[in-house]
Amino acid sequence: MSTAPLIEARGLDSFYGRAQILFGVSLTVARGEVVALLGRNGAGKSTTLKTLMGLVPPKAGEVLFDGTRVHGRPPYAVCRTGLGYVPEERRVFAELTVEENLEVGRRPAREGAPHWTPSRLYELFPNLGRMRDRRGGEMSGGEQQMLTIARTLMGNPLAVLLDEPSEGLAPVIVEQMGDAIRALKREGLTLLISEQNLRFAASITDRAVILEQGHVRYEGAMADLMSDASVREKYLSV
């Protein structure tokens, strides 16, 4: 695995209106790495992902993807560089079937990225394979989450930003989601995952970045975080 950053944020300041949410946020994700973005509610995790994706333009700082500066570009242009984004809201097309939702996301094969087809995605998410003709609006929250991730993968991204993939899901679905994310890592996909469930994050990620009130407070190996109760208590306990 290359140690060169595929995703890099340098000193990001981001605002909603006059309210500053991120304060000098810097982080890196190496090619093939899976990194957890942790923190309490309101820490700035979702805003960080949206800033990387161009949905929230930073007032200061830089975003680089695969060595190219992408801040200031519209989200569709950032997407075309090979960065995928799965929002927390699970925005499936309610009137389209599973198969039709996947076709919406189809993009040509990308050099250096895993190549995804509907049949491969049905292997990754067997639940979707059993409901190809079901409309998005008739699916459970967990099924919609799987479909949103699968649709993003149809774009053959180099990396994916995942916002709260386990939020509100039944334990059995969370377990299936973990299996899928570990399979994506084996495929060489790079992932930055915003997550509240520390136990789930520890089972799927290599490294952790902790945000508190828009500041990066900790960055290190997930194994080190799990062995340091004082850090967990200071920044993650509720």
Image (tube, helix red, strand yellow):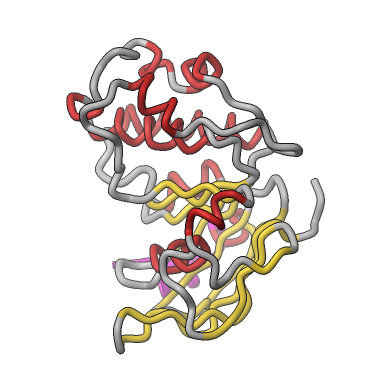
Q: Is residue 52 above or below residue 86?
A: below
Q: Residue at x 61, y 76 (%)?
A: 62
Q: Based on the picture, tell me whether residue 69 belongs to the magenta stretch.
A: no
Q: Based on the picture, tell me whether residue 233 belongs to the magenta stretch.
A: yes
- As drawn, is 76 to the left or to the right of 64? left
Q: Residue at x 61, y 54 (%)?
A: 223
Farthest residue, direction bottom = 18
Q: Is residue 98 above or below residue 52?
A: above
Residue 183's quadrant in the figure? top right
Farthest residue, direction left = 138
Residue range corresponding to the magenta coloring:
226-238
Of residues 121 and 219, the one nearer the viewer is 121
- As drawn, is 38 to the left or to the right of 1? left
The quarter of the image holding the C terminus is: bottom left
**Residue 14 at x, y percent in the picture:** 43, 80
Count of all numbered marks drawn on residues in the image = 0
Q: Residue at x 42, y 27 (%)?
A: 102
**Residue 216 at x, y percent in the picture:** 52, 77
**Residue 172 at x, y percent in the picture:** 33, 27
- As drawn, is 19 to the left or to the right of 229? left
Predominant SS of the magenta segment: helix
**Residue 196 at x, y percent in the picture:** 37, 56
Q: Is residue 14 above or below residue 96?
A: below
Of residues 105 and 236, the one nearer the viewer is 105
Q: Residue at x 54, y 84 (%)?
A: 24
